[in-house]
Amino acid sequence: MPLNLDKCIEQLRNKEILSEGTIKEVCTTIKKLLINESNVNQVSSPVTIVGDLLGQYYDLLEMFKVAGEIPNTNYLFLGNYINRGFYSVETISLLCCYKLKYPNRVTLLRGNNESRPMTQLYGFYGECMRKYGSANVWRYFIDMFDYLSVSATIDNVYFAVHSGISSSLVTLDQVRLLDRFTEVPADGPMTDLLWSSPSAAVQGFGPSRRGPGKTFGFDAFKKFMQVNKLTHFVRSNDLCLDGFSIQFDDALTTIWSAPNFVYRCNNLACVLEFLDNSQRHYNIYMAAPETERYRPATDPTKDIPDYY
């Protein structure tokens, strides 16, 4: 029986999780689609770029209200779909179904949370165990994450990636040659793309306070942009209280799309709209109203909560 994507999307929009068998079929099917994508996806404007979502499913639905529903809006997601929030399963399930139904309207990139160690540490593994009673759904998704692309260009002049640049990757052609079909390594160029952060206090590249990845200064950033003839760089991975921040002479934007992060930070969220006249529009929104969300009770049997 073929996968009924309309039914899956309707079920998820009604806040109901998909069955284990359906999740398996979704992940198997989407891998066949993702395997043909380049490490540097080519996307055309107009496009709306989305940063970290981190399992805040009701806020994802709120974002669609503000920025436009699929397929009316063309979306590029920068990764970190899961962990931290209460509804990682619903979040990644819905985005995968939309990707399968509208492959030319949805681009999914990998974030640093789409990895085995991060999902075991920050909640996704535990959520799958609670909602399905086994680790099977976690395995289906985590294997699929190894297929996600790592970057994109918009109109060949804007560059989008989850986090940063690498001292080992001078050109986009070098990014295209990476073997991405693997777990995120402890270090190296792929790790740098998913973990590195900009810093005005650094010359060239320096160590990262997070551990994985590096910090990169304006000089290293400027060289990367000039070599690849790029005009703007879009990333996520860093919480922005106003939803976004702009650095490096208006050439780098960080966007954050999880409002009131972990349900207590009181931050705004933002998606970045690249318009077809080369203009940028920062679309800011707040968390979904409490009357439109359900928050599960804390599991009293656990010494350490999955989320904080």
Image: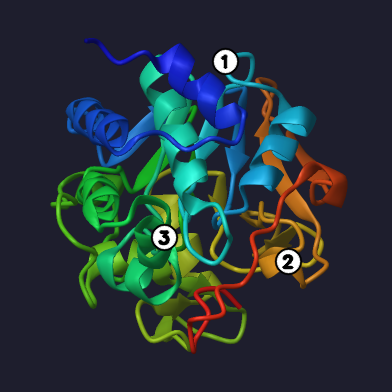
The residue mark sitting in front, 2 or 1, is 2
Q: Is residue 165 visible?
A: no
Q: Residue at horizontal 24%, vertical 44%?
A: 144
Q: Quadrant of residue 235?
A: bottom right
Circle on res. 71:
1
Circle on res. 44:
none
Q: Residue at horizontal 52%, vertical 43%?
A: 91
Give how far apart the Cα atoms at labels 2 and 3 are: 20 Å
Pointer 3: what residue?
A: 130
User: Looking at the image, is mark 2 or mark 1 earlier in the sequence?
Assistant: 1
User: Looking at the image, is mark 2 or mark 3 earlier in the sequence?
Assistant: 3
Q: Position of residue 255 (x, y in %)?
A: 65, 54
The residue mark sitting in front, 1 or 3, is 3
Hey, which residue is sitting farthest front in the picture? 301
The residue mark sitting in front, 2 or 3, is 3
> Could you say whether the residue bearing mark 2 is in a helix, strand or loop?
helix
Circle on res. 263:
2
User: Is residue 139 positioned above or below 245 on the image?
Assistant: above
Q: Residue at horizontal 53%, vertical 35%?
A: 16
> Could you say whether the residue bearing mark 1 is in a helix, strand or loop?
loop
Name the side, left or right, on which 285 lies relative to 304: right
